[in-house]
Image (spheres, rainbow, N blue to C red):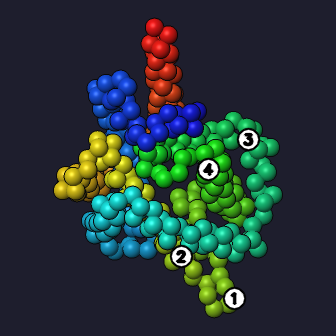
Amino acid sequence: MFLYVTKQFQDQSLFQWLSSTYSKTLSYGIAVLIVIFLLIMGWITLKETVMWTDETYLFFTPILVITLFTLGASLYISYCKLNVIGICAGVLLPLVILFGMFVAIGTIPDKNYRLVAPVLVENGWGDVLHGALFAFGSVIELFLLYLLQHQVTKSIQFKHLVFLILFLSILTTGPLLGTIATFGVEEAAKIRYPAFFQWRIVGIGNYFNHLDFLSIYQWLSGAFIRLAIILYLITQAFNITNKKKRLFIQAFICFIYLLFMLAPISDEAFLKFLSNYYYLGSSIFGVVITCTIALLIKLSKNRMSIHAKK
């Protein structure tokens, strides 16, 4: 369905196609819904990053300072063109993958993959499917490629999607299975940042035992790129090309994020929001948006065929 949708737009953006085929009102309506989703997604990324930073290595640094640094770096990248964001991702993310492979291999002596089996045998498939729903909430974010497909030099093909989904699946299941195999099911369920705790048991010989600083690079690289692409997509949704307007809107969004970060929202309330609303809601939203756009494409084709017969 994703390929079916993207192939219809060709060199047009999603919102340009909606405006020309249907109406600007419909285009702006869908744009507003997607922007709201992007705003929530960006705030969650920022909140998670700042919480993790404050709880793991910058214990005495004010939340305001951490937030300003994170938003400043993301704003600087997002103000540039898409190819600049792509170059930054191409430079940063390969090391993230290498470090991930390193921690996976380095913790092999401490892993016992027999601990993974009770999850399926004793608790049944109900809990497994429930957990898969949370993972699906992240994978469904692929629909955001609708907003970028007209800026890609080569058309998105089936093999590209297969590779991307496989990569995301490995990226999700690898740390999850590694955490269960290392700490067990019960302890893994209590760990807030499982990947970071795996780094704490990695060592090189007898002299290099504290390599968890590499996880800082991993997390911040992903957070900066994610926030930057979110800020960029928000301005693209409304086709804002003027540099000053784009900078003003992105800076205003960062200011709103800053206010939310300073608001007295407890970690417990935040985690309840994620588990009870966000992951399930993002799954539903992604499926509904994709199906709606596919339906609009089908209706437009039927309408064109009727006019052609007349």
Which mark is nearer the camera, 1 or 2?
A: 2
The span from disc 4 to disc 2 (Cα, nearest Å) is 29 Å
- Mark 2 or mark 3, which has the lower sequence index? 3
The one nearer the camera, 259 or 1, is 1
Q: Secondary structure at mark 4?
A: helix
Residue at which label 2 appears:
214
- Mark 3 or mark 1, which has the lower sequence index? 3
Answer left or right for 185 relative to 46.
right
Residue at which label 4 appears:
160
Which mark is nearer the camera, 2 or 3?
A: 2
- Mark 4 or mark 3, which has the lower sequence index? 3
Residue at which label 1 appears:
205
Q: Is residue 78 visible?
A: yes
Residue occupying image coordinates x 33% and y 53%: 231
Residue occupying image coordinates x 70% and y 65%: 182
Residue occupying image coordinates x 66% and y 74%: 102
Q: The N terminus lies in which quarter of the figure?
A: top right
Callout 4 crowding tier (Cα within 10 Å): few <14, some 14–19, many ≥20: few
Which mark is nearer the camera, 1 or 4?
A: 4
Residue at which label 3 appears:
123
Q: Amino acid at mark 2?
A: Leu
Which mark is nearer the camera, 3 or 1?
A: 1
**Residue 268: x, y in percent?**
42, 49
Residue occupying image coordinates x 39% and y 32%: 17
Which mark is nearer the camera, 4 or 3?
A: 4
- Tell which residue pokes out farthest to the bottom in this image: 207
Q: Picture quarter containing residue 100?
A: bottom right
The span from disc 3 to disc 1 (Cα, nearest Å) is 39 Å
The span from disc 2 to disc 3 (Cα, nearest Å) is 35 Å
Callout 3 crowding tier (Cα within 10 Å): few <14, some 14–19, many ≥20: few
Q: Are marks 4 and 2 in contact (CB under 8 Å)?
A: no
- Tell which residue pokes out farthest to the top in this image: 310
